[in-house]
Amino acid sequence: MTEALLINAAIDAAMMLLLCAVATRIRDVSFIDAVWGGGMAVLALASWLQVDAPGHRAGLIAAMAVIWGTRLALHLYTRWRASGEDPRYARMLGKAKAQGRYGRAALTVVFGPQALLLYLVCLPAQLGVLGSGGGAIGPLAWTGFALWLLGVTFETVGDAQLKAFRADPASQGKVLDTGLWRYTRHPNYFGDACAWWGIWLAAAEAGPTVALASLPGPVFLTFTLTRWSGKPLLEKSLVKNRPGYAEYVARTSGFLPWPPRRG
């Protein structure tokens, strides 16, 4: 297993170095958001390919990570192509771009840290696949699959509703508070968390060592989405720039789906 994890780390590093070179050439790192999901799909598939005669559980875990990652990568890549450079990254690397050190900053500020975090969050898929070997799918793995399915459905529907809302000229300047967005301000983040806790549950069926070693993945992802660079950073900007968003925050759950508060 150690050798396979080292190979995966090398794949992760090579992938990020190559994409950093692309970002340096086009002077835009914004596609890193699409790489987040796509990179995890690559590591899950690489893990599965390194298992001799992988069983059904290994195949299920790999499939869950690949499907989740591919969907997210395509969604975010399409959005980047349509919208152009993300203002967050423009602000983050604007000074480096003006000073002619964009490539170094892209590596140290964006692609290097993302390579490490991607590898960490993807541990349930990697260790779950490598630790399952020829194992069959048991009750815990099926429970994980059910949670994963809920998560993927939530984020897929939520993303589709947001895309349709943004495409409607009548929605300009308004806040989306219908569909899944009526019950949680971040159905896509909630879906991501469910998907990776589901993958972790399936991986945990391989044994306590795999369960404990891979636990930092979903824990860190949930922390990132709810307390660090996900919800807090996004909402800080929206409350400031979007009329009516503060009222939306006051009546709508921030993460877990829940009926809106009356006020």
Image (tube, grey):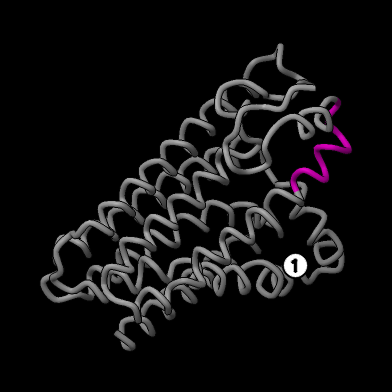
Is residue 17 found left or right of 59 in the rendered image?
right
- Please state the horizontal and vertical placement of residue 136, each as a whole percent of the image: 14, 63
Whether residue 219 sits left or right of residue 146 in the image: it is right
Range of magenta residues = 234-243
Query: Which quarter of the rendered picture does the N terminus lie within?
Result: bottom left
Q: Is residue 86 above or below residue 228?
A: above
- Residue 201: image quadrant is bottom left
Measured along the vertical axis of the image, is residue 60 above or below residue 235? below
Residue visible at 34% across and 65% down in the picture: 44
Residue that appears at 39% across and 63% down = 200
- Is 242 part of what is drawn in magenta? yes
Q: Amino acid at mark 1?
A: Tyr
Per the image, the residue denoted by label 1 is 102
Whether residue 152 is in magenta: the answer is: no
Figure quadrant of residue 94:
bottom right
Q: Which quadrant of the structure image shows residue 257?
A: top right
The residue that appears at 58% across and 58% down in the rendered structure is 222
